[in-house]
Amino acid sequence: MALVVQKYGGTSVGSVERIKAVARRVSKTVESGNSLVVVVSAMGKTTDTLVGLAKEISSNPCRREMDMLLSTGEQVTIALLSMALKELGQPAISLTGAQVGIVTEAEHSRARILQIQTERIQKHLNKGEVVVVAGFQGISNKKDLEITTLGRGGSDTSAVALAASLKASRCEIYTDVPGILTTDPRLVPEAQLMDEITADEMLELASLGAKVLHPRAVEIARNYGVSLVVLSSWSDAPGTRVVSPMPKPRPMEGLEITKAVDGVQLDTDQAKVALLRVPDRPGIAARLFGEISRQKVDVDLIIQSIHEGNTNDIAFTVVEGVLQRAEAVAEAIAPALRTQPSASDEAEVIVARRIAKVAISGAGMIGRPGIAAKMFKTLSDAGINIEMISTSEVKVSCVIAREDCDRALEALCRAFEVDSSSLPSVLNSIAKTEKTPPVRGVVLDRNQARLAIRHVPDLPGMAAQIFGLLAKKNISVDMIVQSQRCRIFDKMPTRDIAFTIAQVDADLAHSALTELAKNIGCGEVSVERAIAKVSIVGAGMIGQPGVAAKFFTALAKEQINIQMITTSEIKISCVVAEEEGVKALKAVHDAFDLAGKEKIEMPA
Ligand code: ADP
Ligand code: ASP
Ligand code: MG
């Protein structure tokens, strides 16, 4: 008999009728010879309603009481579903997270799962009962048994963690869309269903804001090799499989407290081309990378930073062997970007040969704000200056001088306790087949704000101080971009640093950094809230020239200006004006031929 874990989200259990429909599906699954653990969310918008009630009483309610409140939502659903199953003659029992023994760290509102006790569930399964478990909640490991929650959307994580702990044969996530789509169908109804996606790609999509799966659920599935599928609770269609590589053996204790960083990578065959002071208008990146891809040059990191005035810097890295071709393209384009033919303070190309890229990666860095800061601090303690920073949700890459690379590698491996002898190569660690398309999915995030700090002295340790302070305030930083241009300010070479964070953290970050900027000799700190981030994700973009060019061209055709660019091996993100977000998303989705003819039907 196979053990299956099924999870039903809010809309899928949004009414009595829906709960009865879920009960019918559950008992059918049992009848076909499976034993079943069912994880449920709160009904419909219950969690939002509870949050609203709390906000009416307090603008800043204490996190412990919020957990007490929000965990009630799921408790309603487990009882009702269990009753519905019994009505169908199917023995069942409902259990809260605490009753199961879903043991978490004592961090209210964002607890990570440490371990799941399986004895009680097993006992009920052996009696032929369906076990209905409240998602999103657990019990703390401290002396006082506190109710905790895992963070919004966390029921997916409960389900996959249960599947891993019980060694279930599969975990099925039932939701209100047919599976994982090329983008959010609420924004682009022509989004298409995928049959499968790799866990690496899904992890990027989920962390970039594709709400269909909680990123931590994907992380657990990948780490423990859980067979995971996302499908509609309205139909019998097969949905989307999330494919994980063969997992390394891992203990079941510290389930979610895996190391924040599980790899340090070094790439010494890198050279950098930077175009300084290019005009800040639509089409510039498209033109540059369009020409570069016509020359069949594959670019690795790309960053574009923001500046005062109306010019930008764009920099990219390539393998050293193609540097000459890349430089020639940039040199050929630069004059055309000058507004006056002889202006010396306009578009200029600089090249750096002896550079290296060091990166740290690991899904455990999601929601742990201190990791990037720790990398910067480690490099600065080793006296190493960072020339370029590029980030994704699960990776931070820094470009440094090549002569520093051995020291950097050693220091980072020591700081993050990673064994340097077993370093995975970046490219081998990402699952990819012949069929993998260059772009699998597109995501829009409209909940971010951009902060910029002007004139940051170009000395080791500055980034460490800035991001260390944000980490101390528990603020997670997303895209980080350091400008290429060095400006002399009070005899000191300086650069600007810009980054994005969640909009809710913008005020706190702004006031903290304004204070710090004064103390460490930086310039003004500015905030821009009206931004949107559009990202493309696909393992097939590795080693495939032209993907970035196509992305930027799609935006240029719509006259959309790009404010910031960052990349990792399998994603490219652009910041654009908020009001252009949806237009940008549609344009990019179309450009990569992801749109289908039939629109996705959403349940009312
Ligand atoms: P549940 O309550 O079942 O957990 P969620 O609302 O958390 O459901 O997640 C499902 C929603 O995710 C969909 O209704 C859809 O609007 C959104 N979504 C965003 N990006 C995607 C995507 N790439 N594929 C499918 N759904 C997506
Ligand atoms: N009910 C919780 C929420 O709305 C958890 C979940 O549905 O995954 O965030
Ligand atoms: Mg969800």
Image: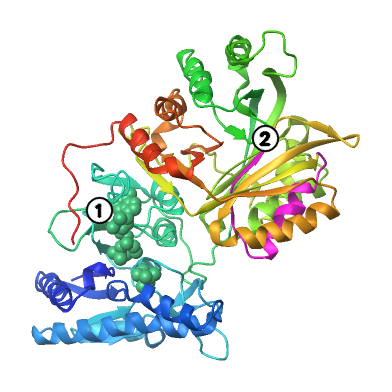
Q: Answer above or below: position of 569 versus 109.
A: above
Evaluate whether residue 167 shows in this view: yes
Circle 2 Cα neighbour tier, 10 Å, few/some/many (<14 / 14–19 / ≥20): many
Instruction: Please give the count of numbered marks on the rendered protein.
Output: 2
Regarding residue 228, the answer to whether it shows in the image is: no
Q: Residues within 10 Å of mark 1 (few under 14, many from 20)?
A: many
Q: Which residue lies at the image location 44% right of the left edge and 48% below the top edge? A: 204
User: Residue 246, percent across and down?
Assistant: 39, 51
What residue is disc 1 on? 179
Quadrant the C terminus occupies: bottom left
Which quarter of the figure has residue 408?
Answer: top right
Q: The disc labelled 2 sits on which kind of residue?
A: His
Q: Tell me if the residue at label 2 has its CB under 8 Å from ligand 1.
A: no
Which three-letter amino acid code belongs to the residue tagged 1?
A: Gly
Which quarter of the figure is the N terminus placed in?
A: bottom left
| Residue in the foreground of this view, choosing between 553 and 4 | 553
Dot 2: element: loop
Residue 536 among those drawn in magenta? no
Q: Is residue 5 left or right of residue 461?
A: left
* Mark linked to residue 296: none
The colour scheme is rainbow
Above-or-below relation of 196 to 402: below
Q: Report the Cα–Cα distance between label 1 and label 2.
A: 41 Å
Residue 196 or residue 146, whichever sits in front: 146
Q: Position of residue 485 (x, y in %)?
A: 73, 29
- Give the magenta-colored segment's residue range: 458-483
